[in-house]
Image (cartoon, rainbow, N blue to C red):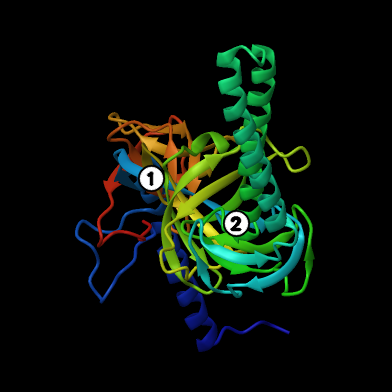
Amino acid sequence: MAFEINGSHIVAIVIASGISAWMYTGGVVIGGQPPEGGSIPINEREAKRASDLFRVRTVHVKPESWQDELVVHGQTKATAVIPVRAQVGGILLQRLVNKGEKVSKNQVVCKVDVGSRAAQLARVQAQFTKAEADHTANLKLVKKGIVSRNMLNTMKASLDAAKAEIAEAKLKLERSDIQANAGGIVQDPIAEVGDMLSVGSVCITLVQSDPVKFAGQISERDIDKVRIGAVADIELISGKKISGKVRYISPSADNKTRTFLTEIEIPNKNHEIRDGLTARANIKLAEIEAYRVSPSWITLSDDGTIGVRTVDKNSIVRFVSIEIVSQKKDAFWVHGLKPGSRIISLGQEFVVDGEKVEAVPETKKTAGMVQ
């Protein structure tokens, strides 16, 4: 059967020929108007594209004065917890203060039964009177030669001993009234009326909370960054924020945790900050010069070194290793750059060290655009 060519076959052949011719020339007509000078072949366009420099966005950076903070977790502590103890034994007759009351130094806070101490004072006073009379009488006899000088010296010693016993008896009697050895606020443990107190028993306990302290542990890696007198911002678990200064850094590390106890002094005139509250301190460290860079600019070299890619004055890409000194949510602070460095902010992953590029300074309008 002979093959017949009809009209549809002819149309198909014409269309196929046209497409082939178009693909060969690479010409593109947009809006019905060909480009001036005719179309550019595909191979020429690819050659031209290969010769064009890769475009990257760059940012000029300069060193800035920057102050880092060290975050320390801990708790508040009273400056001191002082027990007020009995110095003589006896039954507690009166406790003159209650828990929560403020006490001044040398204020009488408890009264102990005097017991036999008053009688003891009367007895030694009588002994002193007798010894004084004997000494006076024998002094006259010595002058007359009736009594020896040695006998008079013995009586003088007895007189002095009686005088010392009077002073001791008076002191014991005075100590029946227990005085606060420091100022503070009364808290447990405290004795109750009727308790039998021995020498050294606690009558009341005083807490000193002005100033109050923040106590926390700092790792051995960070301890050299902190200095006595450094300012710190403290936030209590309640959300209250206060400021203080570093007053103590332990000279030795804890054997188990290898951390150093650090204390921050906080003014607390109204005693609003209580002992034992969970808190967090942000200690201000010394100001240094560093470069602020975006985390997106940072890349790795072939050997895994952290750094950024920069463009030198000859438009050549250079990898610069950096040291990250602090990491924040929106930026890193680093060392290792030079003033005026042009960091590649976009396109750094598509170029290599030593490649020549076309550097386009980043502006607010071009920031984030990739070409």
Category of crowding for the residue at label 2, using alpha-carbon neighbours closer than 10 angstroms: few (below 14), some (14–19), many (at least 20): some
- Residue at 61 percent of width and 11 percent of height: 145
Location of the N terminus by quadrant is: bottom right
Q: Earlier in the sequence, mark 1 or mark 2?
A: 1
Whether 3 is drawn above or below 213: the answer is: below
Q: Would residue 115 be found to the left or right of residue 281 on screen?
A: right
Label 2 amino acid? Answer: His
Q: Pinpoint residue 266: horizontal percent, then vertical percent.
A: 45, 56
In front of the other: 150 or 23: 150
Category of crowding for the residue at label 1, using alpha-carbon neighbours closer than 10 angstroms: few (below 14), some (14–19), many (at least 20): few
Q: Nearer the viewer, mark 1 or mark 2?
A: 2
Whether 180 is drawn above or below 321: the answer is: below
Residue picked out by circle 1: 67
Residue 53 can be seen in this image: no
Label 1 amino acid? Answer: Gln
Q: How many marks?
A: 2
Q: Pinpoint residue 205: horizontal percent, then vertical percent.
A: 64, 62
Q: Quadrant of residue 197?
A: bottom right
In front of the other: 131 or 146: 146
Q: Secondary structure at mark 2?
A: strand
Give the alpha-carbon distance from disc 1 to disc 2, as whole Å. 20 Å
Whether 148 is drawn above or below 238: the answer is: above
- Residue at 48 percent of width and 61 percent of height: 104
- Residue at 56 percent of width and 74 percent of height: 100
Residue picked out by circle 2: 73
